[in-house]
């Protein structure tokens, strides 16, 4: 197996960055195997994260630059790493709706499938000062699920299995990220996968979650 990566930071005119990583995966082969440039199991995909799309500061222009670059690279698909918009945490419903609509419309410009991951900035209403009724039909993660899709899912591609998991939990500051107590030193186990994530893992590993 080989993994070949090309990373590129697209700097927008407002100074922010969109990180684009192209990964090329090859099938397992012995060192004695002759190279085959037409190996049907070889493929590439782009990992794109922290887009933070919003109408201001020419962000759509910068995102379009990233889309155009990805389309030139022609990977098999794109995986986003969350923080697609900026942001729904403190936004009014109208503002959050505008941001989601903008992202969905622009993402249609990719010429290959896009598999989205939810970030904390996609969560609606957690940090609204006057508070938001948790029974609102799009409160929290529901807005992402209604507008983008599932928070936990997996897919296969040319012998590889990919899992998309939601690692966001509501924090004390309502910003959607729970951080461990670091009083005893750094803790690298801050990420969580939740019940839905364990279900996805269980299905892949063919085990039961009790």
Image (spheres, rainbow, N blue to C red):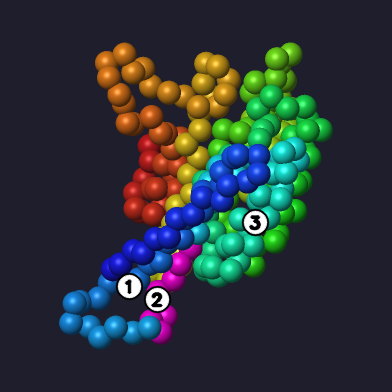
Q: Position of residue 168 (x, y in %)?
A: 51, 33
Report whether 121 appears left or right of 26: right
Q: Can residue 76 be seen in this view?
A: yes
As helix, strand or loop, the secondary structure at mark 2 comes to: loop
Q: Identify the residue shown where x is 58% and y is 69%.
A: 72
Expressed as whole percent of the image width and height from the top left, the position of residue 52 reads: 62, 40
Tag in front: 3 or 1: 3
| Residue 39: in magenta span | yes
| Image vertical order of residue 88 relative to residue 72, above or below | above
Residues tagged 2 and 3 counted as in contact (Cβ below 8 A)? no
Q: Of the two numbered discs 3 and 1 on the same chain, state the one appearing first in sequence.
A: 1
- Residue positioned most to the right: 94
Residue under the image location 65 percent in, 51 percent down: 63
Q: Can residue 100 be seen in this view?
A: no
Q: Label 1, on which residue?
A: 27
Mark 1 lies on a secondary structure that is loop
Which SS does the magenta portion mostly show?
loop
Write the start and end of the magenta stretch as one range: 38-45
Q: In this view, does 147 lie to the left or right of 43?
A: right
Q: In this view, does 189 lie to the left or right of 46?
A: left
Magenta region includes residue 205 = no
Q: How far apart are the two marked residues, 1 and 2, measured between alpha carbons? A: 6 Å
Examine the rendered structure and indicate whether residue 37 appears above or below residue 152.
below
Instruction: Check residue 65 in the rendering and tell me which mark sits there, or answer none.
Output: 3
Does the CB distance between marks 1 and 2 fall below 8 Å? yes
Most distant residue in the left direction = 32
Q: Mark 2 points at which residue?
A: 41
Between the C-alphas of marks 2 and 3, the distance is 29 Å
Mark with earlier residue (2, 3): 2
């Amino acid at each position: 197996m080989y993994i070949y990566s090309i990373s590129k930071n697209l700097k927008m005119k407002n100074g922010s960055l969109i990180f684009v990583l192209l990964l090329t995966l090859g099938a397992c082969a012995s060192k004695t195997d002759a190279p085959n440039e037409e190996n049907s199991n070889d493929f590439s995909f782009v990992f794109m994260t922290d887009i933070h799309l919003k109408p201001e500061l020419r962000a759509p222009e910068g995102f379009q630059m990233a889309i155009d670059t990805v389309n030139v690279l022609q990977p098999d698909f794109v995986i986003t790493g969350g923080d697609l918009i900026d942001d729904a945490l403190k936004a009014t419903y109208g503002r959050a709706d505008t941001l989601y609509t903008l992202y969905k419309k622009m993402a249609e410009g990719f010429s290959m499938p896009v598999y989205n991951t939810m970030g904390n900035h996609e969560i609606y209403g957690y940090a609204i000062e006057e508070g938001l009724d948790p029974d609102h039909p799009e409160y929290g993660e529901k807005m992402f699920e209604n507008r983008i899709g599932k928070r936990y899912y997996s897919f296969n591609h040319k012998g590889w299995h990919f899992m998309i998991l939601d690692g966001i939990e509501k924090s004390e500051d309502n910003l959607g990220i729970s951080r461990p107590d670091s009083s005893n030193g750094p803790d690298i186990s801050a990420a969580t996968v939740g019940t839905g994530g364990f279900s996805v893992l269980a299905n892949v590993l063919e085990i039961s979650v009790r």
